[in-house]
Amino acid sequence: MPTVIFIEPDGAEYPIAVKSGTTARDAAVNNGVPGIDGDCGGECACATCHVYVDTDWMDKIPPREDMEEDMLDFAFEPDLSRSRLTCQLTVSDALDGLIVTMPERQI
């Protein structure tokens, strides 16, 4: 099972084992990771699952689609080079060890 490492702004880490095909949002919400709200249920209709992807992983994840780009306009302090919505990141074996940092708050 691949692992996603969620990091809070204060440095606290939450390594979560994730079944392939699960979104990073569902992994966080189902495992009580603080700072990932996912209010829309994973429908890419809010920005409450916003994270910053570690720069070493940016070339390994798929590019943002238009809907995600639009929703990131509502995220707290987006970094357009690294910001992603975890509902749009489907975990696979290729993403084992993915590191994401949560913003100081969600919108």
Image (spheres, rainbow, N blue to C red):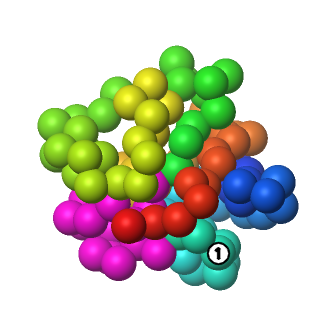
| x, y percent for residue 31 | 66, 78
Judged left or right of residue 73, residue 2 is: right
Q: Position of residue 2 (x, y in %)?
A: 70, 49
- Residue that label 1 marks: 34
| Residue 44 located within the stretch drawn in magenta | yes
Q: Quadrant of residue 104?
A: bottom right
Q: Residue at x 57, y 37 (%)?
A: 53
Q: Residue at x 27, y 55 (%)?
A: 74
- Which SS type dominates the magenta stretch? loop
- The correct choice, above or below, for 69 with respect to 62 in the image is below
Q: Nearer the viewer, residue 80 or 55?
A: 80
Residue 58 rendering spot, x and y as whole percentages: 54, 25
Residue 5 drawn at (x, y percent): 73, 52
**Residue 105 part of the magenta segment:** no
- In the rendered image, is residue 19 in sight? no
* Secondary structure under the numbered disc 1 in the rendered image: loop
Mark 1 is on which residue type?
Answer: Pro
The segment highlighted magenta reads 37-50
Compare residues 8 and 27 and report the one nearer the observer: 8
